[in-house]
Amino acid sequence: MSLPKMTRLPSVRLLSSIHQHHQMLPPSVTLLTAPRRAVSQGEYRRPGKPKEDRFPWQPINFSFSKGVQGIKKHFTLLKKEFSERWVGPEGKPVLEHMLEQNRVMWEFRGPESLDQWTVSSDHEIGGQSEAYLKLGKNNNTCFLYGTLSSTPPKDGETRYSGYCTMRSKRPQASFDRKKHYDWSSFNTLHLRVRGDGRPWMINIGAETYFSHQKDDIYNYFLYTRGGPYWQDVQIPFSKFFLTNRGRVQDDQHPLWLDKVNSIGFTLGDKADGPFQLEIDFIAVSKDYAHTEEFAYELYKKNPDV
């Protein structure tokens, strides 16, 4: 059904006036055009990162062999989950689980142990720092080394730079389901490290209930002595304080030990130069002499009137 003639006249006149105005413009003046829509919805990219004008599915490998390997992997994990439930928590007898005082979470005894970790630095945003991860001389330790540079990239946006970090990958159950470390039976983090005298920041990530808390991380300091001798470090979980994107929060609360996702080590002491950190193992333990619940002040949200 066509519209009445009176309703079409204003639109026709408007289009004709726009066309005449465009013809009257000088050649040096051009009309503004809408920017081309990007392939993905997210237009933001980190400074220094090259622009990738590709479809999201192009970098994915759709090989048949990869799919078969993935199916085998997930069904193996599913079989392991069912078998562990008949034995006890995490495949251990109930009595052993209740009386357990020490548990080694990560130890480096072969190349496959390095696959559980991710190394990054400010090189991803255009910085000059470099970090590498490899096994020690005897293939029994983890050796994190590199060069720290606090020079910011010349992109006009980044003001501060200079960090290197090593972080464990998040555990996953079969078919990429979420899984957490349950450390509720322990109260102390036990490390055996050998550093070069630099201070490191230990980061522990836990599960959160709200989306705006996805950047919440619990931190504490690791002061290495340096030298050829190993250093046994025991840090109570009550000493870890809450931060969000590097800022210490006023509203502090203890770490949820039953839903731990990852642990990491960050170096950012603004001392340019080479660094190295060697780790033998990372464990959790139960110290019965430590009775502190939380080392920092807690605010009472609903005080008594």
Image (spheres, rainbow, N blue to C red):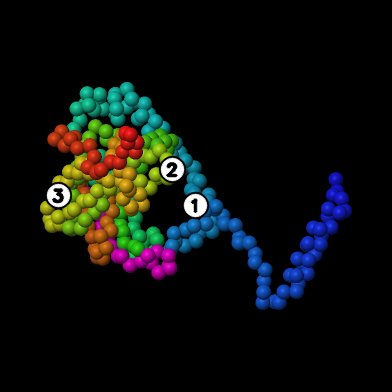
Q: Residues within 10 Å of mark 1 (few under 14, many from 20)?
A: few
Does the magenta run of residues contain 251? no
Q: Circle 1 is placed at which residue position?
A: 59
Q: Residue at x 25, y 24 (%)?
A: 94
- Mark 1 touching mark 2, by CB under 8 A? no
Helix, strand or loop for disc 1: loop
Question: Which image quadrant is residue 39 in?
Answer: bottom right
Does the magenta run of residues contain 150? yes
Work out which residue is located at the far front of the displayed protein and give it: 305
The amino acid sitting under disc 3 is Gln
The amino acid sitting under disc 2 is Ser
Count up the numbered dots.
3
Of the numbered discs in the image, which one, if any, rests on residue 231?
Answer: 3
What residue span does the magenta drawing correspond to? 141-159
Q: Circle 2 is placed at which residue position?
A: 211
Helix, strand or loop for disc 3: strand
Mark 3 → mark 2, Cα distance in angstroms: 38 Å
